[in-house]
Image: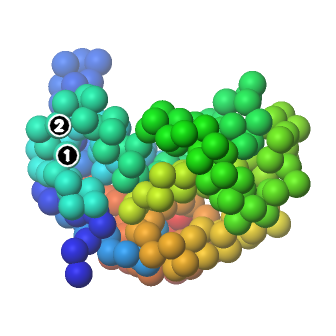
Amino acid sequence: MIPVLEARDLHKTYVGGDGGTINVLNGVDLTLGRREMVAVVGASGAGKSTLLHVLGALDRPTRGYVVVAGEPINGLDEEQLASLRNRSVGFVFQFHHLLREFSALENVMMPLRIAGRDVKVARGRAAELLARVGLSARMHHRPGELSGGEQQRTAVARALAMDPRVILADEPSGNLDLANAEMLHELLVEVVNDLEIGMIIVTHNRGLAARASRVLLLEGGKLGETVVGEVVV
């Protein structure tokens, strides 16, 4: 089976304030298949968010390569990278990043409109996804009128708008109470299985990590397999 995401020998180096180099990623290898949820855990500052940014073509690796949905990102210019992100990768962040002046429906329509989809088609797709995440009755509400859990479910719907092959989630339940976090975790598992996508989740939540197909520990710039009980997440 062709993986939906593959990374080999990823390095990411930054120049520190003193002019020295900081090696955040130091030879990361990762393969993600369809219907697979991978949890990435590790200490704060280990580089987990940097890893997601490189995998999702938001940042370029210093060395190594990434292939998303069969398309290598190395060598693509900024416009091509933006197009790849829009059609193949969905992002869910700890802070939902919804546009506050727009309704939930309009927020979910946004990736479709950016891709040039007809307004009617975009509206229908957005309504369908909001129904899927249990927000049919709230689709015309703006983010400020939604609870934290509803805002994050809207963000999940938006991430699914373009039918991506990969979802990258960074602490998606980090700001939610226990009940809303559990609801979101159930939704993420359902999405992976029903839509046959691959998902990588950076999380400190043991409950969410326990639901993953695999748990990987990022430490010293490298990824290694672990289990939830063996690491503080």
Q: Residue at x 20, y 54 (%)?
A: 71
Residue found farthest to the top: 18
Label 2: how many residues lie within 10 Å, few (<14), some (14-19) or many (20+)? few
Seen from the viewer's position, the closer of residues 150 and 15 is 150
In the image, taking residue 86 as reference, residue 183 lies left or right, namely right
Please tell me which residue lies in front, 118 or 77.
118
User: Observer-nearest residue: 111 or 57?
Assistant: 111
Q: Which residue is mark 2?
A: 76
Q: Looking at the image, do the residues carrying marks 1 and 2 touch, with CB atoms under 8 Å apart?
A: yes
In the image, is residue 40 above or below residue 190?
above
Would you name the residue on which mark 1 appears?
A: 73
Q: Which percent across, then down, holds residue 51?
A: 33, 49
Identify the residue at horizontal 41%, vertical 43% (top origin): 86
| Horizontal side of residue 121 vs 90, given as left or right | right
Q: Is residue 4 left or right of residue 147?
A: left
Q: Residue at x 17, y 37 (%)?
A: 76
* Residue 142 location (% of width, % of height): 81, 35
Q: How is the image coloured?
A: rainbow
Based on the displayed image, in which of its 4 quarters is residue 211 positioned?
Answer: bottom right
Local crowd at mark 1 within 10 Å, few (<14), some, or many (≥20)? many
Question: Which amino acid, mark 2?
Answer: Leu
Q: Residue, x 26% and y 24% (percent of image)?
A: 16
Residue 38 visible in the current orientation: no
Percent position of residue 132, x then y: 70, 65
Q: CA distance from mark 1 to mark 2?
A: 6 Å
Query: What label does residue 130 carry, if any?
Result: none
Residue 48 drawn at (x, y percent): 40, 51
Task: State whether residue 145 is above or below residue 101.
Answer: below
Amino acid under label 1? Ile
Q: Tag 1, which secondary structure?
A: loop
